Amino acid sequence: MRGRLRERLKGVIPPESLSLVPRSYDIIGSRGKAVAIIEIPEELRPYEAEIAEAIMELHRSVKSVLAKESGRAGDYRLRRLRLIAGDPDTEVIHKEAGCLFKLDPMKVYFSPREATERGRIASKVAEGERILVMFSGVGPYPIRIAKLRGDVDITAVELNPDAHNYCVENIHLNRVEDKVHPILGDVRDVCPRLEGGFDRIVMPLPLGAYRFLDLAIPLLGEGGILHFYHWAREPSLFEEAERLVSEAADRFDREAEIIDRIKVSQYSPRVWKVRVDARIL
Ligand SMILES: C[S@@+](CC[C@H](N)C(=O)[O-])C[C@H]1O[C@@H](n2cnc3c(N)ncnc32)[C@H](O)[C@@H]1O
């Protein structure tokens, strides 16, 4: 995909503007219907219709092109998106590793770029595990796990009603009703009511998951695994995340044994989304 859009726009927009055309953009959906999401620099605004047209020519499945109008914000982690061309109905069914995720990117968080990370988490799960996915969105983590493993019991908690409703639909679409149990609500209200002893808890809310560690730690059984996401600044990428997890464990007279740490994706030149995995003893 990289560079093809610029190539396509040669002779359509002024040559001096070509270098401003983004090298990449997201496509969410499937062969039948997809949406493209692109960041258009201010200088290219006069040509956004041509850019959208070129994207739709390059990818026949793309029926709507949305421009990013803001960074992600608020509890639901949404950004403002503006339709610049195509169908105003932006609900799609995204395919990922044999799973189907129905969603509207105007209403819910979803990133196709996180597919590899979801696969990494799913592959760590063993048969028979009882798992809590906090901040579960439209359900990509629980559904990827449930499709890979035969015998798992997953509770998925999400605050955004639109995301929760899509999660319920996606559970049916993927036929994992017996394995994934979605709950609409704030983890602050829901988690204290859950029965403890989870084998694994996933916390995919990099901006702020640390605020909820005190809800997660007591719900983990002895030796349970925590997947903790965090925004981290170079050069010491894991120090703060590890300290936050260890201090939270400490508050409950538990011990956190750090068993893995990875850079998940880069946010800006020196800021990364990282994941720290800990066994809570
Ligand atoms: C970064 S998104 C991740 C969504 C999903 N796990 C995914 O990977 O697509 C974080 C999600 O957490 C939800 N959220 C934020 N605060 C929450 C809270 N206090 N309780 C439950 N869900 C929350 C947001 O609505 C959002 O859907």
Image: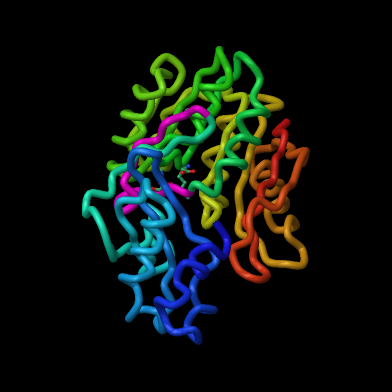
Q: Which one is in front, 199 or 197? A: 199
Q: In which quarter of the image is residue 40?
A: bottom left
Magenta-colored stretch includes residue 104:
yes
Residue 97 location, x and y as percent?
A: 54, 31
Picture residue at 48% right of the left edge, 49% below the top:
111
Residue 225 location, x and y as percent?
A: 67, 32
Q: Given the current orientation, which residue lies at the most extreme left position?
A: 88
Residue 150 location, x and y as percent?
A: 56, 13
Picture residue at 68% right of the left edge, 66% below the top:
233
Q: In which quarter of the image is residue 253?
A: top right
Say above or below: 273 vs 260: below
Picture residue at 55% right of the left edge, 56% below the top:
1
Horizontal arrangement in the rendering, residue 87 relative to residue 184 (left or right): left
Say above or below: 159 vs 199: below
Q: Which colour scheme is used?
A: rainbow
Q: Given the current orientation, which residue lies at the most extreme bottom position?
A: 16
The overriding secondary structure of the stretch rendered in magenta is loop
Q: In which quarter of the image is residue 197?
A: top right
Q: State the count of labels.
A: 0
Picture residue at 57% right of the left edge, 37% below the top:
202
Q: Which one is in front, 143 or 4? A: 4
Residue 67 location, x and y as percent?
A: 36, 65
Q: What's drawn in magenta, residue-wise?
A: 98-111
Q: Which one is in front, 115 or 25? A: 25
Quadrant for the C terminus, please: top right
Magenta-colored stretch includes residue 47:
no
